[in-house]
Image: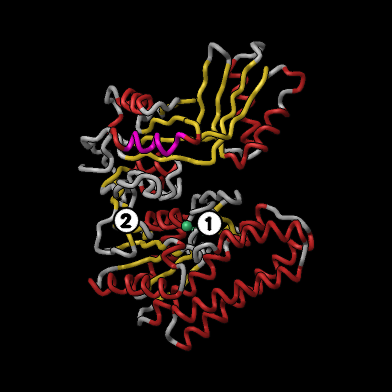
Amino acid sequence: MRVVMKFGGRAVANGEKIKTVAHLIKRFKDEGNKNEIVVVTSAISTVTDTLLETANRVAKEGNTEKTKEFVDEVRKKHELTASEAITDINELERVKEEINERLAEMEKALIGICLLGELTPRSLDYIGSFGERFAAPILAGSLQSTGMEAVHLTGGEAGIITNEEYGNAQLTGSAEREIRERITPLLENKIPVVAGFIGETKKGTITTFGRGGSDYTATIIGTAIDADEIWLWKETEGIMSADPKIIKNARKIPYISYIEAMELSYFGASVLHPRAIEPVMKKEIPIRVKNVYNPEDEGTLIGKEAEKTKKAAKAITLIENTSIINIAGTGVRSISDVAARVFSVLAANNVDIIMISQGSSEMTLSLVIDSAQLERAIGAIQSINTGGTVIRNFTSNSDVCAMGVVGAGMAGAPGVAGKVFSALGKEGISVIMISQGSSEFNISFVVKKEDAYRAAQAIHDVFEMGTGS
Ligand code: ASP
Ligand code: MG
């Protein structure tokens, strides 16, 4: 069996956990001597955050001394992790040396950012890439210590060749063949350990797929090498019917279709990178989300069939820090003209739109975006309204939460929307905005922030998401 196994940041959070991961891989390898494994690793948990925050900070502050202190902290963290995870002394020395070489590159780049006081998307991707580039040698070293032959590779070394869209890189046409040619020969006698999240342009510049991108790395590789399955190992049971921190009787969903999983990942469920499903769809490669603490458990299987269970809706998700923008047209221009102008200026300013709804008779347009992008969005919309000919007025409200109900059983099933909204009505929750995707696999709506958890519970209850099949 040929499997790509991806380990998230929390699964490799320290040396002990990395050892557990190495044993888990070894067990699978030993189960059948025909088993072939590609490992994809995330950065050690919180490392990517720290790298990106630091890059932003040093660009503003320009303090080279503090930059050196930061590099030392990163060194300590990774050397400690390596010395816990790697029991073979020689291997440990090799890995430490490699980490230090990479740290020297990182330090140079950070000092450069410091002195220039400028942080481009390209340098942000470069700095952000180091987390995975430290983690991959450590995990490979840990595998070596358990007696396996492992080699670690960066995204570029694994053939992941992308365009120059920093922060959201797209694969080039030749990448799939490139990946296949580089990875397949290794499988004969080695375990490749690939740094997730990152790719490389044809010119050799590092790019990333955006936050959480290691899932995507795993599914790209799995597709390129025709894996039998892709296993995404997390510190959760699998994909859940709701966030268990909010809904006490949330439970694992045993099976979910590609489309449903995609809807979920687009709609705030942080289980999967939004682009992770797309590569596997054509070849229909199954993905499993598995729990590192319970490896025998089947986890959640993600596959092609959108089998309709008795339940119309499978999961409820919410995106907490959202803002709604209401735009009223002037009547001078058609609402589609207003929409076209608003969407293009928002796109030009990198504002992601989560939901859209339009009331044509009143010439109004409502948009939901991430609150972190609100200021930028307002500035952008103001910029197209010189003379007030496009927009009469617009308002925004950050006290809202966008929610999504997802399930293949909703398509063509009458009354599902009614059930959603009457459940909210019974709770006395008013709905601010509604939208339903044409796939009918998703109904999304906006409520006041203070109502969000109650709304989630009401919907989880009415569709009995916490029980049965
Ligand atoms: N390390 C990256 C992040 O934190 C990628 C990943 O974990 O998948 O976003
Ligand atoms: Mg992650």
Q: Which residue is mark 2?
A: 237
**Residue that appears at 66% across and 70% down:** 70
Viewer-proximal residue among 149 and 354? 354
**Residue that appears at 49% across and 25% down:** 432
Viewer-proximal residue among 257 and 227? 257
In the rendered image, residue 437, in percent from the top left (x then y), is placed at: 41, 29
Secondary structure of the residue carrying tag 2 is loop
Count all numbered tags in the image, as a single digit.
2
Secondary structure of the residue carrying tag 1 is strand
In the rendered image, residue 427, in percent from the top left (x then y), is placed at: 37, 28
| Mark 2 vs mark 1: in front | 2
Q: Which residue is mark 1?
A: 161
- Residue 452 is a magenta residue: yes
Can residue 213 be seen here? The reply is: yes
Quarter of the rendering containing residue 281: top left
Local crowd at mark 1 within 10 Å, few (<14), some, or many (≥20)?
many
First in residue order: circle 2 vs circle 1: 1
**Residue that appears at 76% across and 22% down:** 386
**Residue that appears at 44% across and 30% down:** 445
Which amino acid is tagged 2?
Glu
Which range of residues does the magenta coloring cover? 451-460
Can residue 204 be seen here? The reply is: no
In the rendered image, residue 333, in percent from the top left (x then y), is placed at: 64, 14
Type of secondary structure dominating the magenta stretch? helix
Spatial separation of the CA atoms under disc 2 and disc 1: 33 Å
Local crowd at mark 2 within 10 Å, few (<14), some, or many (≥20)?
many
